[in-house]
Amino acid sequence: MVEVALHTRLRPGKEADYDRLHAAIPADLDTALREAGVHTWRIWRHGLDLFHLVIVDDYSSMRAALRNHPANVRWQAQMTELLEVEDDYSGAISEVKLVWELP
């Protein structure tokens, strides 16, 4: 299992839409994430900045499994309208490098 920290950013004025859509994600997306090896996915929002912490069996495998999954394709189409930079699953990710950890 790995922990992956990500940073994404909302388009200005899309905060309420983002919060509303994430109040309850679709059941088929929940199932797809779990089947792809996700154990936990947390998102914090500070203004337009989104900080994600994903605990997953294998992050690259998860992205490969979700890339063309119908539930994720529908979800990403909605997110594209809200995010400053869309995630097209082309390989580039906005992973945040761990710099320090309290042992």
Image: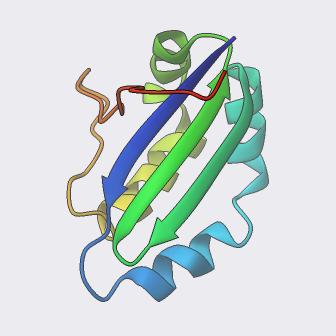
- Rendered position, 5 above or below 98: below
Q: Is residue 52 above or below residue 12?
A: above
- The vertical placement of 63 against 33, above or below, is above
Q: Is residue 65 left or right of residue 27?
A: left
In the displayed structure image, the side of residue 87 where residue 68 appears, left or right: right
Q: Position of residue 32 (x, y in %)?
A: 69, 33
Number of numbered discs on residues: 0
Residue 66 placement (x, y as % from top left): 52, 28
Taking the spot 68% from the left edge, 33% from the top edge, the residue there is 33
Is residue 64 found left or right of 90 in the rendered image? right
- Residue for point 58% across, 55% down: 43
**91 or 1: nearer the eye?**
1
Residue 11: quadrant of the picture: bottom left
Residue 5: percent from the left, percent from the top? 48, 35
Is any part of residue 46 visible from this angle? yes
The residue positioned 30% from the left and 42% from the top of the image is: 87
58 or 53: nearer the viewer: 53
Instruction: State the quadrant of the C terminus.
Output: top right
Q: Quadrant of the N terminus?
A: top right
Instruction: Let me know if residue 68 appears in the view.
Output: no
Query: Residue at 75% across / 44% down in the picture?
Result: 30
Vertical side of 102 occupied by 73: above or below = below
Residue furthest to the front in view is: 103
Q: Nearer the viewer, residue 54 or 30?
A: 54
Task: List x then y, in percent, for residue 94.
Answer: 30, 36
Question: Of residues 103 and 19, which is closer to you in this image?
Answer: 103
